[in-house]
Image (cartoon, helix red, strand yellow):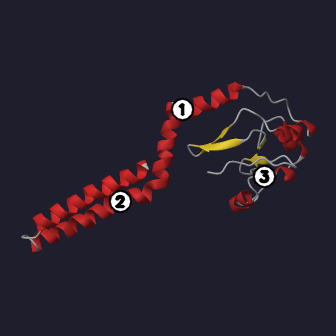
Amino acid sequence: MDCAILSEDSLIWVCDYPEGDVKQLVNDWIDRNYDFFADFTPELRNNSLQLQGPCYPVIFPGISVYWSCQFIARASNVSMRHWQRMGGVNIIEDIVIDESIHGAINSRSGVLKRYVADVGKAWPVLLVCGGISPLFLSLIWLLMIRHFVEAMPWVTDILFNFLIVSVRMFYYLKAG
């Protein structure tokens, strides 16, 4: 996941998917980097300046942690200046923001959401590696046992040793 990047010359906005007055296709919304603040009525702009949505300013730099943007508790001076010029509400820079984000990420529900998101992204791999490939390989193994009874102990021994050496080399390369 990519986090919104701060701009040096303007204030970047991230908006919820448009509903109500502004109607866009999801692809248009993504192509505009989730920003349609300029298309708002004065009332919706005022709501966003009061941090009531549907758009929110990107004032704090962020990094991607566990597929969500974790904001650093130091506001960008340039973005903060743009925010104050536009008449936005006062934003407090404090470690409380950082602590609340860490609390949300490390909570049980946050961990469960990450696990569910991982399974949601990896379901094709789980299906192929956990279901189709083992079934296919076991059928091949049974056919080899049936037709090559005399050679199978040697084939098994050679493949097992190859597997052990491969795993050992993998961890050796991984360790540096």
Q: Earlier in the sequence, mark 2 or mark 1?
A: 1
Kindly identify the residue that appears in the image at 63 percent across and 32 percent down: 101
Q: Earlier in the sequence, mark 3 or mark 1?
A: 3
Kindly identify the residue that appears in the image at 69 percent across and 29 percent down: 97
162 displayed left or right of 83: left
Residue 171 image label? none
Q: Identify residue for label 1.
A: 106
109 displayed left or right of 30: left
Label 1 residue SS: helix
- Residue 52 is situated, as x and y percent measured from the top left of the image, at 78, 36
Identify which amino acid the numbered label 2 is placed on: Cys
| Mark 3 neighbour class, 10 Å CA radius: few under 14, some 14 to 19, many 20 or more | many
Quarter of the image for residue 77 reads top right
Check the image and name the residue furthest to the front: 176
Quarter of the image for residue 156 reads bottom left
Q: Identify residue for label 3.
A: 35
Q: Identify residue for label 2.
A: 129
Kindly identify the residue that appears in the image at 51 percent across and 47 percent down: 117
Q: Nearer the viewer, residue 146 or 109?
A: 146
| Mark 2 neighbour class, 10 Å CA radius: few under 14, some 14 to 19, many 20 or more | few
Quarter of the image for residue 138 reads bottom left
**3D distance between C-alphas at marks 2 and 3:** 39 Å
Label 2 residue SS: helix
Tell me if residue 19 comes above or below residue 127 in the rendering: above
- Residue 58 is situated, as x and y percent measured from the top left of the image, at 77, 43
Identify which amino acid the numbered label 3 is placed on: Asp
- Residue 85 is situated, as x and y percent measured from the top left of the image, at 93, 38
**3D distance between C-alphas at marks 2 and 1:** 30 Å
139 displayed left or right of 91: left
Label 3 residue SS: loop
Q: Nearer the viewer, residue 145 or 127?
A: 145
Tell me if residue 144 comes above or below residue 108 in the rendering: below
